[in-house]
Structure formats: C-alpha cells, structure tokens
Amino acid sequence: MSIIETFTANEIMDILIDIGVEVSFESAEQNVISIPTIKCEFGQISFWCTLLLREPFFEACGLYAFTYKSDNPFVFANQFSEGLRIARAVVDLDDDGLVEVDEDGDVLIVARAELRFNGGITRDHLRFLMEMWIEDLFDFYELELDIEDDEASSVVEGNTETSPVSLLDQVMACLSDGKKFSAREISRLLGADRQMVNPILYRHRETFERDNQQPPHWSLKK
C-alpha cells in the first residue's frame, strides 16, 4: 500500500473513470475560473472537480455540484449538511452578499467538498472518498429509488434496534440469495443510517462487490 501526497490530473481522472464517471478535462486557460477542472457526469448527476496547488502534481482537489430550489432552500441546505457526509451544502451569495437566484426566483445551492492529498493518502482511499461524494449527490439532487414492499418485509422481519446481530452481518443477510441493492435501499431495508452502511460496503471489498449501475448496486462476492 503506497501513501501518495500528490496526484496528476490523469491519475484523478483514472480513479473517476474506474468508478463509472464520464470525465472531460479543461485546463486553466480553457475555463472562466482559471483553474484546471475535470467536468464529471454520472447518470443524472453532474459535478466538477477543480485541481488545486502546484500543477501538474496537485496537492488537493475541490468537488462542486449546483442546484436551484424554490422551497425552503436554507432548510434544505441545513438538513443536507447534517450527519456524516463528505459533501456540505450552502446557499450561494453573489458579489454583493445577496442570495443568488435565477430568472424564476429559485435559489442557488452549492454542494462542495475539499480533499487534501499533501498529508498522505492512498489511491484506494481517494477512490472511496469520491464514491462517498457521489452517494451524497443522490441526496443533493433528490434522486429517489423505489423499494418493493415484499422485499422490505422479508429482509426487515425480525430486525430490531436491540438486535445483537452486527450491522455487517445484517448487510450480508440483506444481500443473501443473490440479491442486489443500492446502499440507499440496504439502509432503508435495515432501518439503518446510510452513512453507517456505506463504509461497511466499501471497506469490506473481500465480501461485497458493486456493479456499474447508477447508483451502484451491491451483492455478495461469489
């Protein structure tokens, strides 16, 4: 396991491509913010990765996504930012310190995260952080997934808050018999916080594997 303190643009794009993200690179001379930027598309999700500090061996990157909301934008941003997340959401302000709105009066909300490499990070951990960021964006863009009631009842039956069974064992049981679920679906089926389920899935790669759906669906390794 090698600890890395800088990444090139190509190395970061390789990580994003490896998790199913479509990428395109813009140099500092090509975009309006004068910062090297990777434009990213993952299904219905769009975001930007700005490369920071000492090109071509970058020591950090910034992740950004944007949406507009008309109903309770401050409440949405505050609620989104609660809990254990890579992403944080803020209501954006213009140069005069006023809330930025579009022509319909909808308020601009920005999701952002900063990932630093210069203290040392592995490639696998950077990939994990990128995957967690993408998971957060499904909440940010309010992309919902449906779960069949019969699936929910069969998995949740007998599961209580006082169950002595570990969450790892519960996730394994949820994916038994060849079943596949997204992290969000697993969380709902088990009545668990998705921010607790995600690390289990990503850290136990010897047990779980994911497909290339958007969002990814998980199963037990064969």
Image: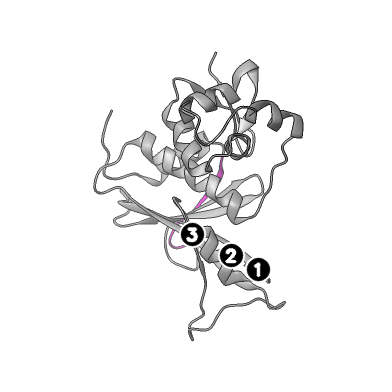
The span shown in magenta is 21-29
Mark 2 or mark 3: whose residue is earlier in sequence: 2
Q: Nearer the viewer, residue 139 or 128?
A: 139
Q: Quadrant of the C terminus?
A: top right
| Above or below, 95 relative to 139 | below
Q: Nearer the viewer, residue 38 or 174?
A: 174
Secondary structure of the residue carrying tag 2 is helix
Residue 195 percent location from the top left of the image: 48, 44
Residue plotted at (36% across, 45% down)? 8
Q: Is residue 157 visible?
A: yes
Residue 109 percent location from the top left of the image: 56, 67
For badge 2, the amino acid type reads: Phe
Instruction: Please give the residue where the numbered disc 1 appears in the rendered image.
Output: 69
Residue 99 percent location from the top left of the image: 55, 80
Residue 166 percent location from the top left of the image: 45, 28
Q: Is residue 110 visible?
A: no
Mark 3 or mark 1: whose residue is earlier in sequence: 1
**Label 1 neighbourhood size at 10 Å, few (<14), some (14-19), many (20+)?**
some
Instruction: Please give the residue where the numbered disc 3 appears in the rendered image.
Output: 81
Residue contact at pointers 1 and 2, CB within 8 angstroms: yes
Instruction: Please give the residue where the numbered disc 2 appears in the rendered image.
Output: 76
Q: Quadrant of the N terminus?
A: top left
Residue plotted at (56% across, 33% down)? 160
